Image (spheres, rainbow, N blue to C red):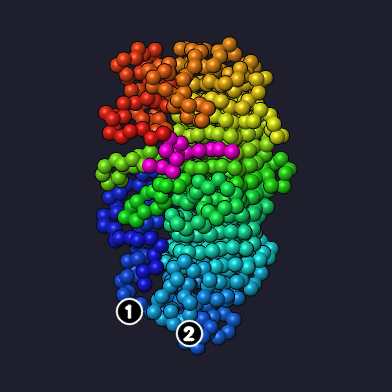
């Protein structure tokens, strides 16, 4: 009877865990784990007394006649205290309602004889429900007179068609008070006004999905998934050997893959480092399109998005360390009217938050903000997680991520006009830490662009190389970093090198805005100026190692022109050479870093044989560290 999506244990003393001490994704994951364990406890408590009905096409099935066999079985279950409806493989042309009761709807049985012995093909999605009524979802869940627990497993939901402003295509949960578990589910080829694949609207609903495919669905808002409401949440998890994701969904408005609004929480642990657009690995948020904003994800109205590329365990485990969470090959502005932004992610509005940890945001495109656009006081935060600590106060352990030394990447994104990787406007803010920017392109700001008043991008520990392509292929490739009027960018403890920007342009353009370049290396192989000559509102340079300084205007301290002596810049290794680099023991603690470097080396290691220039901190994104004594591990390059 245990159909739960992950191995779980009964939890004792959960109230001792204080949510305020946890990251947002941890809090959401713990809540979902509690839900799963409560469902397991409830099912196990029924033991041998649990009851079921079977549905299929053979004479040994309890429900085998008529055009509404599954609905008939569910109605009987509701009226007679049946716990579970077991459905044999095959195609069922009907729509299904689950109204205000708890039930397990289990597919994946070869026939009703297998259903009688509860012999499920764990990977099957051959139990297919094909919608027959336009304007109705394949499965509709409702009811709020009690908290209901609903598990749906091993089904394909398909064929929903729109009618007027109908909501939800494959699965619609509207106004319900429900815990919904989805296991081994394919939701594909559905269309509706909002939430082509899955819709969660109103009520108090938590969806936990394991091995979920949401593919080729269409809607005006949220082609794949639409979630709205402060009491609603969706969490997507999957096995490391399951290759499904949220793929090739279409929005004719916002949110090709996922639309998160009005305080809903969306958390995903699923992704892949596959660089191919049409490979077998479909994990993550892949190849979705929106004519307007947010090809992959659109977040608004205080919606919260957590994308987590590392494992988190709380009695049960979510995610894995060996692959990133990914947003790949998504497109905003798919109609080409130059109005769509945020190819991978678009976040807008007060209290809207997007958090990405150990992410791979790649090959996304839009008119502006090829990878990410953050607007209207929304916040985007991204970082590498290199260590894991127990929420119970246990030992700290190292995370060996999918790409040691570059666990968090924004690469190969395209913004037709501004912001190849990240674009901030109208008060949007971004905190970007320990992140690699490579091969991004745009007319202006190939890596990052902060456009106007109150827009702010703060970067620490970044490596930016290979952005732009010298103005070829329809992109001007002006600047790696660009700040507009009254906007702000701070770059600290970072390395910018070997980008493909024409000599007639500049690496940083700070016209009319505020730029702070702190404790960083900017060293290009060609004689491109570091800074534009236009007059900024304010600029500060402190503890910098550059390839030229004649273009700098404003306040500057400890600025040197020298070769940083990278380990192997020809092959993309921008660690500083211990035996030759002048970047060691270079900066003081005036602008002390908040994080270790991308290899998890502690900052500010003071080498006894090297004279400090300003202090013990190495300039740039890399810190040379006596790792044997510092943490007992050798550096992984």
- Residue 226 in view of the camera: no
Q: Residue furthest right?
A: 337
Q: Which residue is mark 2?
A: 61
Q: Looking at the image, which is closer to me, 377 or 509?
A: 509
**Number of other residues with Cα within 10 Å of mark 2, as a class: few under 14, some 14 to 19, many 20 or more:** many
Tell me: residue 467, above or below residue 517. below
**Number of other residues with Cα within 10 Å of mark 1, as a class: few under 14, some 14 to 19, many 20 or more:** few
- SS assignment for the magenta stretch, majority: loop
Q: Residue at x 38, y 42 (%)?
A: 400
Residue 255 got which mark?
A: none
Q: Residue furthest bottom?
A: 59
Instruction: Identify the magenta region.
Output: 400-412
Tell me: residue 430, above or below residue 495. below
Task: Name the secondary structure under disc 2.
Answer: loop
Q: Looking at the image, which is closer to me, 29 or 455?
A: 29
Q: Residue at x 73, y 43 (%)?
A: 337
Q: Residue at x 51, y 30 (%)?
A: 571
- Quadrant of the drawing holding the N terminus: bottom left
Left or right: 489 in relation to 384:
right
Image coordinates of residue 155 in percent, x first then y, are 51, 69
Q: Picture quarter containing residue 501? A: top right
Image coordinates of residue 517 in percent, x first then y, are 51, 21
Tell me: residue 126, above or below residue 26. below
Image coordinates of residue 279 in percent, x first then y, are 57, 53
Tell me: residue 602, above or below residue 543. below
Contact (Cβ within 8 Å) of mark 1 with mark 2: no
Measured Cα–Cα span from mark 1 to mark 2: 20 Å
Tell me if residue 144 is in the magenta stretch.
no
Of badges 1 and 2, the one in the foreground is 2
Q: Looking at the image, which is closer to me, 192 or 533?
A: 533
Q: Which residue is mark 1?
A: 49
Q: Looking at the image, which is closer to me, 293 or 320?
A: 320
């Amino acid at each position: 009877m245990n159909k739960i999506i992950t191995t779980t244990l009964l939890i004792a003393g959960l109230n001792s865990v204080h949510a305020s001490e946890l990251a947002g994704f941890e809090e959401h994951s713990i809540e979902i784990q509690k839900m799963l364990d409560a469902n397991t406890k409830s099912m196990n408590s029924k033991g041998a007394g649990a009851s079921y009905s079977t549905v299929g096409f053979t004479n040994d099935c309890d429900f085998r006649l008529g055009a509404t066999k599954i609905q008939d079985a569910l109605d009987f279950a509701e009226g007679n205290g049946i716990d579970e409806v077991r459905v044999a493989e095959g195609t069922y042309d009907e729509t299904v309602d689950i109204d205000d009761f708890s039930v397990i709807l289990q597919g994946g049985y070869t026939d009703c004889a297998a259903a009688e012995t509860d012999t499920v093909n764990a990977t099957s999605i051959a139990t297919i429900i094909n919608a027959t009524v336009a304007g109705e979802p394949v499965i509709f869940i409702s009811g709020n007179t009690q908290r209901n627990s609903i598990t749906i497993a091993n089904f394909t939901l398909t064929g929903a068609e729109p009618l007027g402003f109908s909501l939800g295509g494959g699965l619609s949960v509207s106004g319900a008070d429900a815990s919904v578990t989805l296991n081994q589910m394919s939701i594909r080829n559905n269309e509706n006004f909002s939430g082509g694949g899955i819709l969660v609207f109103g009520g108090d609903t938590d969806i936990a999905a394991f091995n979920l495919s949401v593919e080729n669905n269409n809607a005006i808002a949220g082609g794949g998934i639409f979630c709205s409401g402060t009491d609603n949440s969706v969490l997507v998890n999957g096995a490391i050997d399951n290759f499904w994701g949220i793929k090739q969904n279409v929005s004719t408005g916002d949110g090709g893959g996922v639309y998160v609004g009005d305080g809903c929480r969306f958390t995903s642990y699923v992704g892949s480092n596959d660089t191919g657009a049409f490979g077998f690995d479909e994990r993550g948020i892949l190849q979705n399109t929106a004519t307007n904003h947010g090809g992959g994800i659109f977040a608004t109205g205080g919606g919260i998005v957590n994308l987590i590329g590392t494992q988190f365990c709380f009695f049960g485990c979510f995610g894995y360390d060996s692959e990133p969470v990914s947003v790949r090959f998504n497109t905003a502005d798919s109609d080409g009217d130059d109005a769509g932004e945020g190819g991978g992610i678009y976040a807008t509005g007060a209290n809207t938050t997007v958090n990405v940890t150990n992410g791979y945001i790649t090959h996304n495109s839009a008119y502006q903000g090829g990878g990410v656009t953050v607007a209207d006081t929304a916040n985007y935060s991204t970082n590498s997680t290199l260590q894991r600590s127990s929420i119970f106060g246990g030992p700290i352990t190292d995370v060996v991520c999918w790409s040691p030394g570059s666990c968090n990447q924004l690469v190969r994104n395209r913004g037709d006009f501004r912001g190849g990787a990240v674009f901030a406007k109208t008060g949007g803010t971004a905190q970007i830490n320990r992140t690699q920017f490579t091969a991004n392109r745009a007319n202006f700001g190939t890596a990052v662009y902060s456009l106007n008043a109150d827009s702010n991008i703060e970067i620490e520990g970044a490596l930016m190389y290979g952005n732009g392509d010298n103005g070829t292929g329809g992109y001007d490739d002006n600047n790696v970093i660009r700040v507009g009027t009254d906007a702000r960018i701070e770059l600290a403890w970072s390395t910018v090198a070997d980008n493909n920007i024409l000599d007639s342009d500049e690496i940083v353009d700070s016209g009319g805005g505020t730029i702070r370049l702190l404790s960083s290396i900017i060293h290009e192989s060609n004689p491109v100026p570091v800074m534009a000559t236009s007059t900024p509102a304010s600029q500060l340079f402190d503890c910098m190692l550059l390839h030229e300084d004649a273009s700098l205007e404003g306040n500057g301290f400890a600025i040197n022109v020298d070769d940083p002596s990278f380990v192997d810049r020809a092959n993309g290794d921008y660690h500083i050479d211990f035996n030759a680099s002048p970047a060691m023991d270079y900066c003081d603690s005036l602008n002390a870093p908040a994080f270790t470097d991308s290899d998890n080396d502690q900052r500010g290691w003071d080498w006894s044989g090297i004279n400090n220039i300003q202090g013990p901190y190495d300039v740039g994104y890399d810190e040379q560290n006596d790792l044997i004594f510092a943490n007992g591990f050798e550096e992984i390059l």
